[in-house]
């Protein structure tokens, strides 16, 4: 009887710790998988029209896989931001004017935003360039801000221009189309 009295509580304690141990292993496995994804230099993005794009991070910037020779303009914006709304038509104009030479990608800071809301922004503000809505948006924005040494709280819109994976110039806040176009022309040698 005494052996049974001691054995049952020991068995219960042993099973309890075993269950905790398995849960810890599961958590470690999930963390390891997440870290493996985060350590990659690729940013798979999906546009609101369901096109898959992949940005590649370099030590000095980013480039668009499968379109490495184009200038890459990354626009970090929010649908509710008046300066972001105003810059959308300028970026669309530049995308149209230099369509063979540049790729403008709009990345929303709004987590879990609905594609319909992004489409509404695109329609209302003439944003005819690529808008992405991906679970990688936040990771891309954080990496971009870190590369630009902006910290966690930076102004939007944030526009970064890259050529061959190297930063050409970046702007915080609203900027005139002519300034952006001047940088585009300089980068293209025009």
Image: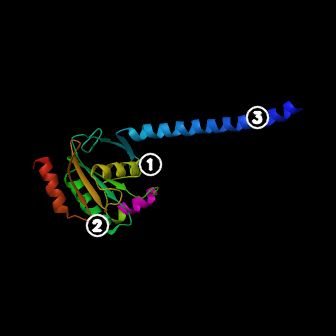
Q: Residue at x 24, y 43 (%)?
A: 60
Disc 3 versus disc 1: nearer the observer: 3
How packed mark 2 is, by other alpha carbons closer than 10 Å (few <14, some 14-19, many 20 or more), is: some
Q: Residue at x 30, y 67 (%)?
A: 83
Which numbered disc covers residue 135? 1
Image quadrant holding the N terminus, namely top right
Residue with the most extreme top position: 3
Q: Nearer the viewer, residue 124 or 54?
A: 54
For the residues bearing labels 1 and 2, Cβ distance under 8 angstroms:
no
Instruction: Give how far apart the Cα atoms at labels 3 and 1 are.
Output: 46 Å
Q: Residue at x 32, y 65 (%)?
A: 85
Percent x, y of residue 133 = 41, 52
In the rendered image, residue 93 lying in the magenta stretch gets the answer no
Q: Is residue 64 above or below residue 48?
A: above
Badge 3 element: helix
Instruction: Give how far apart the Cα atoms at labels 1 and 2 are.
Output: 26 Å
Residue under label 2: 86
Residue under label 3: 10
Task: Report the magenta residues as a range.
Answer: 114-122
Q: Is residue 9 left or right of residue 35?
A: right
Badge 1 element: loop
Percent x, y of residue 163 = 20, 45
């Amino acid at each position: 009887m005494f052996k049974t009295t001691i054995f049952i509580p020991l068995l219960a304690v042993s099973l309890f710790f075993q269950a905790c141990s398995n849960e810890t292993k599961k958590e470690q496995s999930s963390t390891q998988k997440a870290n493996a994804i985060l350590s990659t230099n690729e940013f798979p993005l999906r546009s609101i029209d369901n096109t898959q794009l992949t940005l590649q991070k370099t030590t000095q910037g980013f480039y668009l896989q499968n379109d490495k020779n184009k200038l890459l303009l990354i626009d970090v914006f929010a649908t509710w931001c008046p300066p972001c709304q105003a810059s959308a038509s300028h970026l669309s104009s530049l995308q149209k004017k230099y369509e063979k030479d540049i790729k403008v990608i709009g990345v929303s800071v709004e987590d879990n935003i609905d594609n319909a809301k992004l489409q509404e922004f695109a329609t209302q503000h003439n944003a005819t360039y690529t808008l992405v809505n991906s679970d990688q948006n936040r990771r891309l924005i954080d990496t971009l801000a870190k590369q630009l040494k902006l910290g966690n709280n930076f102004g939007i819109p944030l526009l970064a221009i890259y050529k061959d994976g190297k930063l050409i110039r970046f702007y915080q806040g609203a900027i005139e189309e002519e300034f952006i176009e001047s940088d585009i022309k300089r980068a293209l040698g025009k």
